[in-house]
Image (cartoon, grey):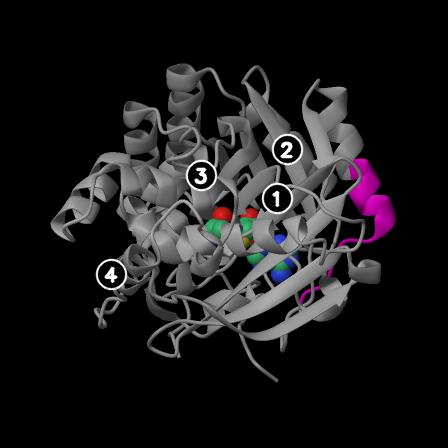
Amino acid sequence: MPEPGELVFEAPKRGKPPVHLLDLDQAQRRQAVVDLGLPAFRADQVSRQWLTRLSDDVDEWSDVPADQRATIQGALLPTLLTPVRVIDCDAGATVKTVWKLHDGALVESVLMRYPGRVTVCISSQAGCGMNCPFCATGQAGLTRNLTTAEIVEQALAGARSLQRGEVAGGPGRVSNIVFMGMGEPLANYNAVVGAVHRLNDPQPGGLGIGARGITVSTVGLVPRMKQLADEKVPLTLAVSLHAPDDELRDTLVPVNTRWNVGEVLDAAWGYTDATGRRVSIEYALIKDINDQAWRADLLADLLVGHLVHVNLIPLNPTPGSKWTASRPEDERTFVRRLEARGIAVTVRDTRGREIDGACGQLAATTA
Ligand code: SAH
């Protein structure tokens, strides 16, 4: 168990899962196929099957000779995720899956269907090293980083089950991916950026989801935020602020002792300058902790005039936590104070609460 305030930036080293097609970009896939003694164009066919047709059953791949299918499956398509528990709510419109990885580590992903869009919330690490006291994932510490393929497969699993019509509402497509499951995405930078490219790359190399549809949420790892801006990685950045003042943020988001509110917001504005994309500020409303009207005003002072949107999240309950969501009247006041300063605000829904699938509740227990 992590000590209070302890931060873990380097994930423990464990045996890596076998290499998977999705770890590779299109050029690397062609090379891998050639290394197997097969023609390079097989890589394009396999990519089309896996990522465009969403077919994970090689027996259906009638454009590839049967013996070559087996070779490719054996070398490039190991099973990375095995579902150990699937649980839904909202009459089947919200589905949480607990996945077991090759080494037994557990992660969770959540599919949420809304009128006109489907969002899959995916994990980037098994556990998390950032130790935010109001988040269930942080309480058990960091087990390991996920690979690019382990991250992308969570999104693809959602896409396949939607295509097969397994989600209430009939067959559909994934429109949005949010890196808001377990883990701190920017603490697993290379694998996450690889996954973002795979999600964004045009078909057949990737899933072809636009940057606006891919959101990466961070506690505020400033050097990595700067790197995202420099590299113009195609995504929407969300920053977990949760407090406008360092005194409180030091306790809610312990990494604030390393990079404070001013530094995190400067990095966020650097990102908007570099990309022209609006940054999202996440703020979990915790009763009598960070929901005072004066804190709304202070938050507005920091944000006003910037390309920004505030996403308020009513605190979701986690085991053993003494905190709870704000009173409705305090939430309303908080919203109004921000809006009065011309700041765009939305209140995130609490989808999946009853299945421990909402923000901050992912702890990957099989119970
Ligand atoms: N590690 C990343 C992404 C994971 S969580 C990050 O912290 O940004 C996605 C969002 O849910 C974050 O804003 C996180 O602070 C928030 N969150 C965590 N626990 C929560 C809880 N109990 N209730 C509401 N939001 C929570």
Numbered disc 3: secondary structure:
helix
Q: Can see residue 337?
A: yes
Between the residue at mark 3 and the residue at mark 2, the CA separation in whole angstroms equals 25 Å
Query: Which quarter of the figure has residue 142?
Result: bottom left
Residue name at image x 55 percent, y 43 percent: 177
Residue name at image x 69 percent, y 24 percent: 344
Residue occupied by mark 1: 283
Q: Position of residue 93 (x, y in %)?
A: 77, 55
Q: Position of residue 253 (x, y in %)?
A: 47, 53
Between the residue at mark 2 and the residue at mark 1, the CA separation in whole angstroms equals 7 Å
State yes or no: discs 2 and 1 in contact (Cβ < 8 Å): yes
For the C terminus, which image quadrant? bottom right
Residue occupied by mark 3: 199
Circle on res. 75: 4
Q: Position of residue 294 (x, y in %)?
A: 68, 37
Query: Hey, what amino acid is under mark 1?
Result: Tyr
Nearest to N terminus: mark 2 or mark 1: 1
